[in-house]
Image: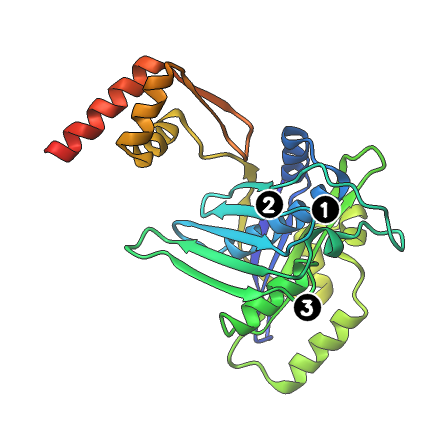
Amino acid sequence: MAYVVRALPVNKNFRAFAVECKDVVETVRKIQGLSPVASAALGRALAGVALLSADLKTGKILLQINGGGPLGEILAEGNYQGDLRGTVRNPNVYLKIKNKKLPVGEAVGKNGFISVVKDLGLKEVYQSSIKLISGEIAEDLAYYLTVSEQIPSAVSLGVLVNTDGSILAAGGFLIQKLPEAQDKEIAELEEKLKNFPLITTLLSQNKTPEEILEMLFSNIKILEKRELRYKCTCSKERVENMLIALGEKELEDFIKKKESVEVTCHFCRTKYTIPLERIKELLKELKEIKGG
């Protein structure tokens, strides 16, 4: 079972999150036919957005990464219910392994931005962006949180891909400094992180998110354990609303061509076919809205 935990280290001025999401990443890999390096990159982004959304009480968070590399734009979304989805612009990018690792940084690129969009159900959606520094995603996310949101953070994300392309492990952790944190405990944590095992090593050893946090802090208090699942929010209604948003001229053009409209969701690859008669109804509804 994929899940994320939110915790407080006992007698330490930090807050901590950890996630295991192998099943989610494997589901996305199968649906989208991801190459190994695309799986590794999108898997890291999904683990990252799972950590970001771990303490949401409502709404959702979208993580956007575009570093100008061959993978193109990467999108990962998580909501307060534990639903995750994601996609990568170019899922069939293949790069040679370097130093026994998939070259995620090269595939993502660093000539671009990482953006976080928070939709908490309020009138305005919060969005902030910052330049990428490595394309490795974990380092970029930590830099974003420290600089853009003014929360000093440490992030570790990892995906282990099997020789057949399947996902062996995926997850990560996020540690954030609280205002009361003392220099001594910050230095202690930094020293521990320097020699800490790779997250993929720990996950492949079947270490749980709780156990990983206990390795970092010895004693933790779990505040919440939230199950995660792959779930897309697309629907025929949303597709129809998208067509309406195109405007009268576009709908009239579809009708002139006397063709149905087929739309494929980038996230789950579901195909929606809107027949000609329904397009005519949507045009009529749009004209009524404008006339009314």
Question: Which of disc 1 and disc 3 is earlier in sequence?
Answer: 1
Residue at figure coordinates x 71%, y 66% from the top left: 216
Task: Give 75 or 216, whichever is nearer the viewer.
Answer: 75
- Of callouts 2 and 3, which one flags the residue occurring earlier in the amino acid sequence? 2
Q: Which residue has dot 3 on it?
A: 217
Q: In the picture, residue 127 is in which quadrant?
A: bottom left
| Relative vertical location of residue 281 with respect to residue 248 in this rendering, above or below | above
The kind of residue tagged 1 is Ala
Residue at mark 3 to residue at mark 1: CA–CA distance: 28 Å
The crowding category of the residue bearing disc 1, from other C-alpha atoms within 10 Å (few below 14, some 14 to 19, many at least 20), is many
Q: What residue sits right under mark 2 in the picture?
A: 3
The amino acid marked with disc number 3 is Phe
Q: Quadrant of residue 36?
A: top right
User: On the picture, is 89 further left or further right than 118?
Assistant: right
Q: Which residue is mark 1?
A: 40
Report helix, strand or loop for mark 3.
helix
Q: Amino acid at mark 2?
A: Tyr
Give the structural element (helix, strand or loop) at label 1.
Answer: helix
**170 shown above or below 14:** above
Task: Please say if the residues under marks 1 and 2 sit with CB atoms less than 8 Å apart.
Answer: no
Is residue 218 in view from this perspective?
A: no
The image position of residue 171, as x and y in percent, is: 68, 50
Q: Residue at x 40, y 16 (%)?
A: 260
